[in-house]
Image (cartoon, rainbow, N blue to C red):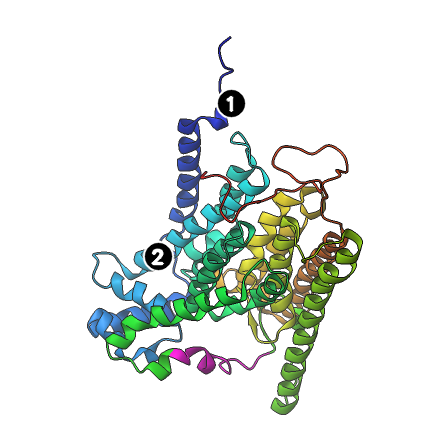
């Protein structure tokens, strides 16, 4: 009897064609915005490009104080000065390339949850990751670079799920080298360390990658101290409680007294730190205490759902509680909330909608300020921002509650608790049993 024909999505030619169509759709969305220039491009990015262009391209990096980004991003911009492309097109193209890398890791993470070769979910996640408003606008309109460090963070989450800690930490090293905002997922990393999803010695990969990326600039003559302390110089750049980020500080009026404002900022940092430490402690205790006693486990464990939800909780809680956050600082949460919705669709289908709504609303005044001037008047800036932040706050609370519920669940045991689908444990989630990915898709 002849074998049954492969389902359409399981056929290699169909998968390649569908992937190409998804990439083409993402590029088309960005092509529609190719001529738009943001204020940030004109004030910052174009000036940096012109400085490097007029000072020998890579040789301009002997003193990178003209820019407030770390040198790995400036390498990419310096390379553009040697190419026959306009600064606007080149800078956007760099960011768009990392959007594609980010969507690839989104595909791989969702494929762990839906491992069948004819599963449609990984392709849907890949498409949505490319056309999310904040993602498409960030690179295609704004010419920003948030997709670069986020692509490495999403890659780190993927390698944690695959139990490849060295690659996960290397990815975090790349992310940190591009943007300080990588620290938003450090609470996630701490939980992974304590629960042994990530090895302590694998942390060496983070500074190793970070320092290695500084070496070319050092060889060009850059001051090594300035290279290694670039983020310390950024710490006090902004004194506002919020730079239009949909955070808790939209509910707090910035005092006219600079001393009082600084006290609020300091208190905010301490509160954020206390909340993060509490959440990490609860996550660790739920693995090492109650569950270890009930299941007789010799070592703390985390399920795949818990790993992903921990990353999302970290990415959304930290910028929501910290002062002086920018409008784009929920970018990681934008992407991870989408991925998490494919893992727990019944519980988390609303989360990416709430996060995306609040996050994109914070973009609007900077993208087309002349056409939405009403957003900048007192009524909108006060009551409207409270509504936007309330939407993000609802997402924060919802995600934390769902994460807590997942941590209370007992991992699947060999005795079984009902029917189990292929590729899943008794808790109804994917299992990665080896230290490498189970498939090469």
Q: Residue at x 66, y 78 (%)?
A: 268
At mark 1, the secondary structure is loop
Nearer-N-terminus badge (1/2): 1
Relative horizontal placement of residue 274, taking residue 232 as reference (left or right): right
In magenta, the rendered stretch is 228-240
Answer few, some or many: residues within 10 Å of disc 1's Cα (few below 14, many 20 plus, some between 14 and 19).
few
Residue 396 % position (x, y): 69, 60
Between 239 and 364, the residue placed more toward the observer is 239
Between 379 and 353, the residue placed more toward the observer is 353
Q: For residue 279, say whether it is visible.
A: yes
Between 29 and 108, the residue placed more toward the observer is 108
- Identify whether 370 is placed above or below 157: below
Q: Which residue is mark 1?
A: 7
Q: Are marks 1 and 2 in contact (CB under 8 Å)?
A: no
Residue 67 % position (x, y): 36, 75
Task: Name the mark nearer the viewer: 1 or 2.
Answer: 1
- Tell me, for residue 90, which label it has, or none: none
Relative horizontal placement of residue 360, taking residue 46 as reference (left or right): right
Magenta includes 234? yes
Residue 74 % position (x, y): 33, 68
Count of numbered tags = 2
Q: Which residue is mark 2?
A: 94
């Amino acid at each position: 009897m002849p074998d049954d024909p492969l389902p359409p999505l399981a056929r290699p030619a169909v998968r390649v064609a569908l992937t190409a169509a998804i990439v083409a759709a993402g590029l088309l969305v960005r092509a529609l915005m190719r001529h738009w220039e943001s204020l940030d491009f004109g004030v910052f990015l174009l000036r940096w490009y012109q400085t490097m262009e007029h000072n020998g391209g890579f040789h301009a990096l002997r003193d990178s104080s003209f820019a407030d980004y770390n040198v790995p991003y400036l390498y990419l911009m310096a390379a553009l000065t040697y190419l026959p492309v306009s600064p606007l097109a080149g800078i956007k193209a760099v960011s768009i390339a990392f959007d594609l890398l980010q969507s690839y890791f989104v595909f791989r993470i969702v494929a762990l949850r839906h491992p069948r070769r004819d599963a449609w979910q990984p392709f849907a996640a890949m498409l949505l990751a490319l056309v999310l408003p904040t993602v498409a606008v960030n690179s295609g309109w704004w010419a920003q670079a948030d997709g670069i460090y986020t692509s490495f963070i999403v890659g780190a989450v993927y390698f944690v799920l695959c139990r490849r800690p060295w690659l996960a930490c290397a990815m975090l090293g790349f992310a940190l080298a591009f943007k300080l905002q990588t620290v938003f997922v450090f609470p996630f990393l701490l939980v992974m360390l304590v629960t042994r999803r990530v090895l302590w010695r694998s942390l060496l990969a983070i500074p190793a990658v970070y320092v290695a990326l500084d070496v070319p600039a050092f060889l060009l003559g850059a001051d090594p101290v300035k290279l290694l302390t670039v983020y310390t110089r950024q710490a006090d750049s902004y004194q506002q409680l919020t730079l239009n980020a949909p955070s808790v500080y939209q509910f707090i009026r910035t005092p006219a007294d600079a001393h009082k404002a600084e006290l609020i900022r300091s208190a905010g940092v301490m509160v954020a730190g206390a909340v993060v430490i509490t959440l990490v402690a609860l996550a660790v205790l739920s693995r090492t205490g109650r569950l270890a006693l009930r299941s007789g486990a010799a070592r703390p464990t985390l399920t795949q759902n818990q790993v992903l939800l921990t990353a999302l909780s970290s990415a959304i809680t930290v910028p929501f509680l910290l002062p002086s956050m920018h409008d784009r600082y929920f970018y990681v949460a934008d992407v991870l909330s989408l991925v998490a919705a494919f893992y727990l669709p019944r519980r988390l289908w609303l989360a990416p909608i709430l996060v995306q709504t609040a996050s994109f609303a914070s973009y609007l005044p900077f993208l087309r300020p002349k056409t939405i001037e009403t957003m900048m008047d007192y009524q909108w800036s006060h009551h409207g921002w409270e509504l936007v932040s309330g939407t993000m706050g609802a997402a924060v609370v919802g995600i934390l509650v769902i994460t807590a519920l997942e941590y209370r669940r007992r991992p699947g045991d060999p005795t079984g608790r009902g029917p189990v689908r292929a590729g899943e444990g008794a808790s109804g989630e994917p299992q990665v049993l080896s230290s490498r990915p189970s498939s090469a898709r």
